[in-house]
């Protein structure tokens, strides 16, 4: 089977989402109908894809425990564990991890 | 009351302008570029006593820290309510030694500081981890300095300027000082790119550019730029509570070596980023950032906080600190050109040390007995003169 | 043998690498993406022989020819994010991390080449408007990228707006991916467009391919029944969790909205771009001189002001892929020590005037700030509003860019002012005299993990294993 048809499965905040091999994580999320995932540090505003080419960092997610990965740039791998980032991950208001 | 020109709208110039304007002097701040655009906008905003050895600089730091603690409330009373906060944060510092030798010298250093009234609490490894849960397991001993604090330096500079303006000071930005205004030996003002300004006194607070300004005004000053570099991470869950330094920081600040030196300084900011310093290197006004410097900073930070391994560093910036060969600020009137004053040479401590010198200049200009002995900071002191002759 | 490193594998970089290899140099071609071709020929790695959306890929045969040439003749390192150029020593060193985007423990690699060709390209510039940070509002580049590489339609009813000829391919991309495009809204009025494109139009004859491209897009718009409106802009987006509608208004020639012309259009995706910004991190780190318009200055042979550095493509001026290929060919040959092919020089000359024309026809006009409200987010990363910026400027009447950024945190977030930098600079200029500070200097061209920074070391390619595509 060529890479074009291979399926990959990610878990996103515990939910399994399937995509095609070769897609970006943002591509998998968008194809599954998710238009936004991150929420901003100060206002808790929803954010998803904006520039699509790795410049704006709006789409960042935590992948396999590593923060601030641009979902539009990172290829989705089978078994990737994706967590969305929110104000609690961004050190506001002095809370402890 | 006198008319005074302050050269430089960085934090020291802003503090001097505020102190003099509040006494009723007619103050004009002359700035080559924009306010808070040089050294004051390229540091962490440290207000430290922990790194100051017993002596005149520690006295100045203790007095400045007192003034900072009062300033926040003063500014809140003076400035409009929607003015941004200067983010004064008395978070305290923790200095960490990871070797037995390092621990011995750190504890001895702190014991001497205590004789001057510095609060310096010794911490064993367990106490150090209680204060900083993510600190390296290699810690042998640490000292907690509750007196260390932090401020947002650019906002603080603008706030001091705003306070000065309310007291009648004027700021002339984009005006470069070209020469002294014609006079008869005593300073009579300055010729700038935006016209000639006359005044009874001129205070040079131009940071690392002070030597060049002194020369244009017919004097000289042995203050050189020494570059420091800071790394900034992306926002992350709060991992570091205090300003945390490795014990080498103290040695590096005191050292006069021209070569590249590192010491670890790690802290979180209110916005969630982590700041990582510090390096010191004499390389003129060369703004290039060698990767060797960035790597050295990263290694020192990881030695203190191994858990930062995956933290994303998004920015590196360098700033030029005004460095005097004997490591003391230069505060006072120039005996060779009456009416010409200096308030500079604070190196990397200029944010913390800005308020003390401002008070000192105001006292000396008014002929009042100052709260600190000004002799150690005199532009005529031997430590400076020797360097000027050598140059 | 001369060693040339080319940074960026879009049209300019591919052409530069091929030309340098043809001239006899040893060539290393680096790109942060996993595919060759850059944004212009963006595609999924698995689709390299047959693009997913062939209608959206222009001159794919040229891509294949260049791709085959560089694979044959050059060392190609993909997934190589160049994060710094160190020019503090005698010879410049390029530092890259090779591995997955934003990964950890990526492989550090460094090069000390004889010559560097920078071909880092450009990205969309989007002006802020109320609601532009709602999900579903994307750049025109994002719409194209996701249509080309992943076949994804970003919405059912799409609005395309902004300024420039590149709105057309964005609209066609969206339509091809299956969206209904409600309309394309170009901010500049017909008179401005005509004054840019029409005078001495025969001088553009050399760039005939552009004309055919544009005609093709216009035919596609007609085929998809997509209206193209000029002198019109999206001045606000509305919605809660995502965009649900936009306000469209007529603009005067300065881009000030005409009162009473507003109408609300339902939409679930908005693609907005007002032009392009060059990716200047590496040229600025190398010390390359910039023009007043802030593009990399190059000479006849595409040499920058810094010895050993050449530049090609959009970082030297926005002129499209054909010009980029011509510039790349000139730069690659020159960097390899050869005389550039006269045909490449002629091809470059033909496209040379395109950039000026485009700016005259589609450039941003100052009246746009009239559509901002106090609440409009200007800096997306740090969520700094227009009102906050203006209030801070009033509190600090002598502050410049640095002080303003530190006081408000505008431009200090993770994108490092790549999105809002020019906008914040222009808002300061609108309030007071121009300053000389810019947001262009980013010594770290991309974020680097602290451990990667600490553990990296200088190394030459010969000391390390070779990478393949």
Image (cartoon, grey):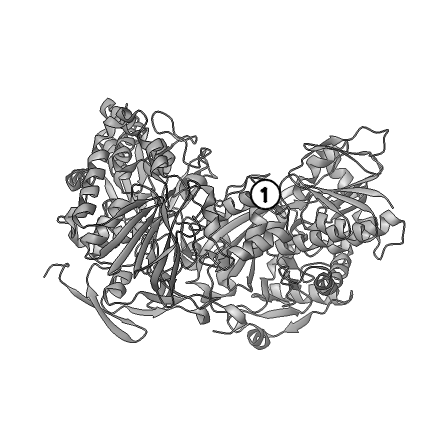
Q: Nearer the viewer, residue C392 or B214?
A: C392
Q: Residue at x 65, y 67 (%)?
A: B90
Q: Which residue is mark 1?
A: C432
C136 with respect to B358 (left or right): left
Label 1 marks which chain's residue?
C
Q: Residue at x 33, y 55 (%)?
A: C138
Left or right, C225 with reference to C137? left
Q: How many marks?
A: 1
Q: Position of residue B159 (x, y in %)?
A: 68, 55
Secondary structure under badge 1? loop
Residue C364 or B225: which is nearer the viewer? C364
Q: Is residue C255 visible?
A: yes
In this view of the protein, can residue C105 be seen by the observer?
no
Give residue A24's position: percent from left, percent from top. Answer: 26, 59
- C41 shown above or below A29: above
Classed neighbour count for the residue bearing mark 1: other residues with Cα under 10 Å, few (<14), some (14–19), many (≥20): some
Give the percent coordinates (x, y) of residue C102. 35, 58
Q: Quadrant of the N terminus of chain C?
A: top left
| Residue C34 % position (x, y) | 25, 52
Of all residues shown, which one is farthest toward the left?
Answer: A1
Q: As drawn, which residue projects farthest toward the front?
A: C260
Vertical placement of residue C19 versus C448, above or below: above
């Amino acid at each position: 089977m060529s890479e074009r048809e291979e399926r990959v499965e990610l878990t996103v905040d515990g939910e399994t989402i399937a995509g095609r091999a070769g897609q970006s994580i943002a591509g998998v999320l968008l194809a599954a109908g998710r238009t936004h995932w991150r929420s901003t540090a100060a206002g808790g505003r929803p954010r998803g894809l904006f520039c699509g080419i790795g410049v704006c960092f709006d789409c960042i997610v935590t992948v396999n425990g590593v923060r601030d990965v641009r979902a539009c740039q990172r290829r989705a791998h089978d078994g990737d564990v994706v967590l969305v980032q929110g104000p609690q991950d961004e050190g506001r208001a002095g809370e402890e991890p | 009351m006198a008319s005074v020109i302050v050269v430089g709208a960085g934090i020291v110039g802003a503090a001097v302008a505020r102190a003099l304007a509040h006494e009723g002097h007619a103050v004009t701040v002359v700035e080559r570029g924009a306010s808070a655009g040089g050294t004051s906008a390229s540091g962490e905003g440290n207000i430290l006593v922990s790194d100051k050895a017993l002596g005149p600089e520690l006295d100045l730091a203790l007095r400045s820290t007192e003034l900072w603690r009062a300033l926040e409330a003063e500014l809140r009373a003076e400035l409009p309510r929607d003015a941004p906060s200067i983010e004064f944060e008395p978070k305290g510092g923790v200095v960490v030694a990871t070797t037995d030798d390092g621990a011995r010298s750190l504890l001895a250093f702190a014991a001497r500081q205590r004789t001057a009234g510095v609060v310096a609490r010794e911490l064993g490894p367990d106490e150090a981890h209680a204060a900083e849960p993510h600190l390296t397991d290699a810690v042998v001993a640490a000292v907690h300095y509750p007196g260390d604090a932090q401020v947002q330096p650019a906002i603080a500079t603008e706030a001091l300027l705003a306070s000065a303006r309310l007291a009648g000071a004027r700021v002339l930005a984009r005006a470069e000082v070209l020469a002294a205004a014609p006079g008869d030996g005593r300073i009579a003002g300055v010729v700038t790119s935006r016209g000639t300004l006359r005044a009874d006194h001129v205070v040079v607070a131009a940071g690392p550019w002070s030597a060049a300004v002194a020369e244009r005004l017919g004097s000289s000053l042995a203050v050189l730029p020494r570059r420091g570099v800071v790394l900034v991470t992306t926002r992350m869950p709060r991992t570091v509570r205090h300003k945390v330094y490795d014990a080498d920081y103290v040695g590096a600040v005191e050292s006069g070596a021209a070569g590249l030196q590192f010491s670890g300084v790690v802290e979180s900011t209110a916005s969630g980023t982590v700041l990582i310093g510090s390096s010191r290197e004499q390389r003129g006004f060369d703004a290039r950032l060698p990767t060797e410097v960035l790597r050295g900073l990263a290694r020192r930070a990881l030695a203190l906080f191994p858990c930062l391994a995956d933290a994303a560093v998004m920015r590196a910036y360098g700033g030029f600190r005004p460095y005097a060969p004997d490591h003391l600020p230069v505060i006072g009137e120039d005996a060779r050109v009456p009416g010409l004053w200096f308030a500079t040479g604070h190196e990397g401590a200029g944010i913390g040390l800005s308020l003390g010198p401002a008070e000192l200049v105001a006292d000396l200009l008014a002929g009042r007995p100052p709260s600190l002995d000004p002799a150690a900071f005199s532009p005529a002191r031997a430590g400076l003169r020797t360097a000027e002759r050598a140059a | 043998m001369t060693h040339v490193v080319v940074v960026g594998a879009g049209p300019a970089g591919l052409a530069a690498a091929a030309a340098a290899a043809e001239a006899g140099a040893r060539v290393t071609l680096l790109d942060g993406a996993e595919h060759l071709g850059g944004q212009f020929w963006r595609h999924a790695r698995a689709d390299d022989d047959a693009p997913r959306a062939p209608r959206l890929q222009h001159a794919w045969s040229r891509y294949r020819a260049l791709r085959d040439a560089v694979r044959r003749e050059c060392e190609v390192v993909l997934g190589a994010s160049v994060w710094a150029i160190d020019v503090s020593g005698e010879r410049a060193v390029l530092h890259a991390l090779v591995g997955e985007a934003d990964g950890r423990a990526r492989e550090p690699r460094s090069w000390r080449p004889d010559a560097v060709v920078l071909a880092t390209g450009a990205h969309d510039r989007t002006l802020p408007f109320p609601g532009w940070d709602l999900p579903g509002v994307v750049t025109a580049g994002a719409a194209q990228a996701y249509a080309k590489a992943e076949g994804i339609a970003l919405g059912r009813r799409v609005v395309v707006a902004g300024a420039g000829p590149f709105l057309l391919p964005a609209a066609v991309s969206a339509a091809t991916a299956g969206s209904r495009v409600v309309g394309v809204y170009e901010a500049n009025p017909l008179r401005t467009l005509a004054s840019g494109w029409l005078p001495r139009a025969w001088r553009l004859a050399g760039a005939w391919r552009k004309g055919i491209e544009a005609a093709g897009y216009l035919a596609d718009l007609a085929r998809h029944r997509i209206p193209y409106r000029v002198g019109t802009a999206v001045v606000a987006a509305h919605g809660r969790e995502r965009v649900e509608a936009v306000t469209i208004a007529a603009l005067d020639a300065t881009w000030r909205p005409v009162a009473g012309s507003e109408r609300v259009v339902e939409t679930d995706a908005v693609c907005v771009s007002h032009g392009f910004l060059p990716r200047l991190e590496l040229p600025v780190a190398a010390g390359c001189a910039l023009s007043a318009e802030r593009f990399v200055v190059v000479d006849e042979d595409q040499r920058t002001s810094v010895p050993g550095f050449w530049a090609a493509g959009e970082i030297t001026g926005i002129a499209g892929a054909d010009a980029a290929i011509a510039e790349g060919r000139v730069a690659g040959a020159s960097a390899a020590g050869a005389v550039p092919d006269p045909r490449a020089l002629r091809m470059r000359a033909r496209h040379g005037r395109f950039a000026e024309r485009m700016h005259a026809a589609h450039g941003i006009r100052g009246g746009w700030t009239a559509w901002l409200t106090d609440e409009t987010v200007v800096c997306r990363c740090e969520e700094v509003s227009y009102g906050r910026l203006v209030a801070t400027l009033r509190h600090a009447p002598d502050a410049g860019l640095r002080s303003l950024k530190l006081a408000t945190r505008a431009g200090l977030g993770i994108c490092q002012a790549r999105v809002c930098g020019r906008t914040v600079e222009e808002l300061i200029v609108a309030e007071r005299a121009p300053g000389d500070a810019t947001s262009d200097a980013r010594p770290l061209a991309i974020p680097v993990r602290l451990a990667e920074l600490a553990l990296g070391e200088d190394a030459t390619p010969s000391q390390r294993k070779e990478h393949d595509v």
